[in-house]
Image (cartoon, rainbow, N blue to C red):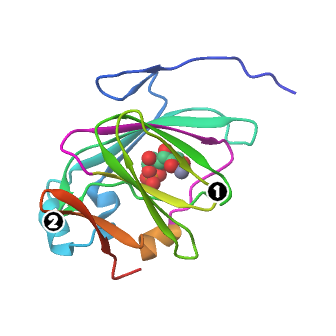
């Protein structure tokens, strides 16, 4: 067996970034334009193509011995009245769980199973959310500042975006009367 060397990473409290930054993923509106409900609002924003979120991912081997860990920085904003959100996914190995720890801002973690069960959890700094095995998960920035959370999950989990890309989540998170509302997604 090859022994892996211990190491640490610094979390930057102001920005939510990691140092060293690891593998950086950036997603703009054009990377997920079909996932928002209001296609006219999408068209109107596509020229600007806003940055919606970034993931700083510590690079460890993608196998069951290891624990993937990363921060997600989800910017504030809306597409029409739908809040900025992550794409969302099931794990490729669907029975792999995950822990989200909110560090900054506020948001909503929405989850669903393939049987159509739906659940949501509010996140604020200090919230530790548990995403159990079999639940797809997406985060939504329901505030007006940057929402940042740390995530840790089994090294071999992988990401399956396919079903979410075609069907979406059971509910969309929209702004209503200066709060958020969970609204049925007609294409689910
Ligand atoms: C990893 C995980 C998070 C997300 C990240 C971006 O399993 O759940 O680190 O990957 O918040 O969201 P997606 O991957 O849905 O674009
Ligand atoms: Zn995940």
> Residue 153 magenta-drawn?
yes
Q: Residues within 10 Å of mark 2 (few under 14, many from 20)?
A: some
Instruction: Choose between 84 and 50: the one closer to the eye.
Output: 84
Find disc 2 in the rendering and name its residue: 80
Across and down, in percent, residue 71 comes to 44, 35
Q: Is residue 89 visible?
A: no
Q: Quadrant of the N terminus?
A: top right
Find disc 1 in the rendering and name its residue: 133
> Which residue is at 41% across, 73% downward?
170
- Image side of residue 58 versus residue 19, left or right: right
Instruction: Choose between 52 and 49: the one closer to the eye.
Output: 52
Q: Quadrant of residue 29?
A: bottom left
| Mark closer to the chain start, 1 or 2 | 2
> Residue 141 magenta-drawn?
no
**Is 118 located above or below residue 137 in the figure?**
below
Magenta stretch: give its range: 142-161
**Secondary structure of the residue carrying numbered label 1:** loop
Q: Quadrant of residue 144?
A: top left
CB contact under 8 Å: marks 1 and 2: no
Q: Is residue 95 visible?
A: yes
């Amino acid at each position: 067996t090859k022994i892996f060397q211990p190491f640490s990473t610094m979390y930057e409290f102001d920005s939510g970034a990691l140092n060293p930054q690891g593998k950086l993923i950036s997603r703009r509106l054009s990377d997920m334009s079909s996932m928002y409900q209001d296609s006219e609002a999408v068209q109107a924003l596509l020229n600007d193509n806003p940055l919606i979120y970034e993931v700083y991912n510590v690079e460890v081997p993608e196998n069951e011995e290891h624990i993937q860990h990363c921060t997600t920085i989800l910017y504030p904003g809306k597409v029409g009245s739908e809040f900025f959100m992550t794409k969302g996914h099931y794990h490729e190995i669907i029975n792999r769980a995950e822990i989200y720890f909110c560090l900054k801002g506020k948001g909503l973690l929405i989850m669903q199973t393939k049987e159509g069960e739906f659940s949501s959890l509010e996140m604020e700094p200090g919230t530790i959310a548990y995403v159990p095995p079999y639940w797809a998960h997406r985060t939504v920035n329901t505030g007006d500042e940057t929402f940042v959370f740390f995530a840790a999950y089994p090294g071999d989990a992988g990401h399956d975006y396919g079903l979410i890309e075609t069907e979406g989540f059971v509910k969309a998170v929209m702004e209503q009367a200066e709060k958020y509302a969970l609204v049925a997604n007609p294409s689910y």
